[in-house]
Every structure is written in structure tokens, then in C-alpha cells.
Image (cartoon, rainbow, N blue to C red):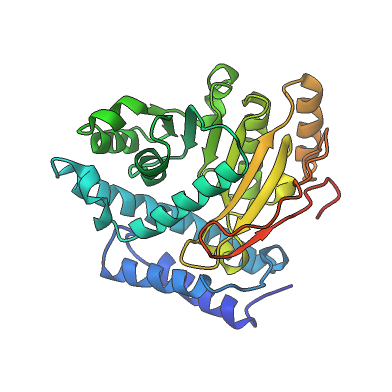
Amino acid sequence: MVCQEEPLVNKINELYEKISSLESLKPSQDVNMLFTQLVHTCMPPNPIDVTKLCNQIQEMRSNLIRLCGEAEGLLEKHYSTILASFDNPLHHLDIFPYFSNYLKLSLLEYNILTQNSIHVPKRVAFVGSGPLPLTSIVLALNHLHETQFDNYDIDPSANEMAARLVEPDPDLSSRMKFHTKDVMSVGKEELEEYDVVFLAALVGMNKEEKIKVIHHLAKNMAPGSTLMVRSAHGARAFLYPVVDPENLCGFEVLSVFHPTDEVINSVVIARKAVDLSSSIYSIEWEQNHTHNFSPMRLQSCKCLEIQPFNPLNHGNMIGELASSGHQ
């Protein structure tokens, strides 16, 4: 078990104590300084395995991820409000301090998507788009110029703020819609219309929640459609939840990419291989879920043997075997 004798864990725990004692996580000098220190601490590649942390640190990590999610949401609302004050908000996206990261992440995801698909997607869903839907906006502006985007978020105020950013742009406002819905209530008739579904890193704040969402998508997405999942690796898993390939039951995992630069999120691309909406699948999944085992696979979900590529000249493409026996 890895506990506080590990210097990295000790440093992260110290920052967690300071962050959790803040009166507010709204953008301020103290908040910005502490989260910048946290990101810089977790960013360097590190072989730490968060599944082997002691219970005390596991609990700290879960709480820290939730604090990061709350702070990220408040930061996005803050800058979305500022951007909405401009006549054309899309011309000023670079005022967001992490905009360059989104440019790199969107390019990375676009390159991974095109490497694993022969068709340009006609319809894309982004689940967990938030008040500042930069991934959808950057993909629509820079890479997918004719694609329709549907953004889903459970927060109506976030969707209202996001919609205001694209309204002044005739092209984007015609191709981008915002839906106030929990993804778990989005049914088959809607989900099977999408060629690609993006699952934001903070949809499903822990493994159990994340697996429930993935199970729902597996039951309702169209066969052959693509799921793009954001995950985290190494010490970056103190910032975002981890999605392992074996968690993607019902999908064929195509590739996993772990950046090593300032792009924090790992990217997992998977393809819906078969229709798993049968009651037998649902019953067997629920039985395993209830007993805290990994979800069952009714088919082998092996990664394709792809030649490694480097979408942004960063990181390493990892060909991982996502079989039911992989732990």
C-alpha cells in the first residue's frame, strides 16, 4: 500500500488540506495559487498506481477530485460570464487561462478519432459540456466544420451560459445545441443518432458512477459508433477519475493515449461493437455490479493492433489488452 511516506503523496495531501480549508473555491488569488501548485505537482510522469493507495489516501483522492471538479466548474462559469460580455465571445476564447490546453487536447482527440475512423462524424454528443464548452467549440471551429454538436449537462444555468457564447456566431449557433439532461435519462432513440459520443472526465466522479454511465451508453449507442472517454494516468489521477479499458464493457477498445505534457487528461477511444441492450446483459451486469466485481464482457474487448502514433508529438500510445481477465 502506498501511503504518506511517499513524498509525492505527502505533497498532494498537504495541498489537499489547504484546498479543503478554503472558504470558497471561486477564482481568487489563493484558489488559483493552490490549484496551480496541485496541477504542477501531479503533471510530471509518475509510475504511481492509485489503486494501491491506502484507504486514508484513497478517501483523500476521492475528495480532492470532487474539489477539483467544483473549482473547475466555478472557473468556467467565471470566464463564461466574462466572455458573454463581448459582442463575439468566440473571438476572445484565449482569455481563458487553459485555452491552449484545450486546443491541444481537441487536436489530440481529433487526430485519434480520424486515425480510427474512415468517416467524418455527422452528429456528435458531448456529455458534461458545462458553461464553457471549449472542446465542442474548438472541434466545431477548427476540425469538424459541418458536424452537428449536441451538448448535454444537468445544470440548466451552465447550458444557458454556454448557449450565450455561440449565439452571435451564425454557423456555430446553427450546428450546436444544448440539452439540460442527465445522461442516464437520455434514451436509445437519442443516443443511437450519434456517430461519436464524448464523455467528459468529471461525468461520474468515482469508478462506480462512471461504470454506470458507460453501461448506459453501451446499451443505447448505435453499433459501430465511437465513444471518446477522458481518463487520467499516474499522479494525474489525483485530479480526475481513472477509466481503465476493462471498465468499457460493451465496447471494443481501440487505443489509449497518455499525454506527458500540460494536457492532463488521457484519452481512450472505443467502438460500440454489438447491441447489448438485451435483458440478459442487464441482469448479468447488475449482478456483478452489486457484488463489486468488474462488469462482465459478453464479447472480447481487445484493443486493435495499431501502429503507435504521436498525435501531438507528446506522450506514448499504449496498446492495452482489455480482456475480461485484465486487472
Q: Nearer the viewer, residue 147 or 191?
A: 147
Residue 56 located left or right of residue 323:
left
What residue is rendered at 14% in x and 44% in y? Answer: 86
Name the residue nearer the viewer: 302 or 310.
Answer: 310
Residue at 63%, 42% (x, y): give it.
116
Task: Decide if residue 113 is on the left or right side of residue 158.
Answer: right
Q: Which image quadrant is residue 180 in?
A: top left
Identify the residue at horizontal 67%, vertical 36% (top origin): 271
Question: Does residue 122 lie above or below 26 as drawn?
Answer: above
Query: Residue 217, image x and y in percent?
Result: 62, 31
Q: Residue at x 34, y 40 (%)?
A: 141
Front position in the image: 273 or 76: 273
Instruction: Decide: is 87 above or below 46.
Output: above
Q: Is residue 152 shown left or right of residue 49?
A: left
List the single residue furthest toward the right. 325
Instruction: Give x and y (percent) for residue 134.
Output: 36, 46
Q: Quadrant of the C terminus?
A: bottom right
Residue 5 spot, x, y in % from top left: 65, 83
Q: Can residue 144 be seen here?
A: yes
Does residue 202 show up? no
Q: Quadrant of the N terminus?
A: bottom right
Quarter holding residue 228 = top right
Q: Position of residue 131 (x, y in %)?
A: 33, 42
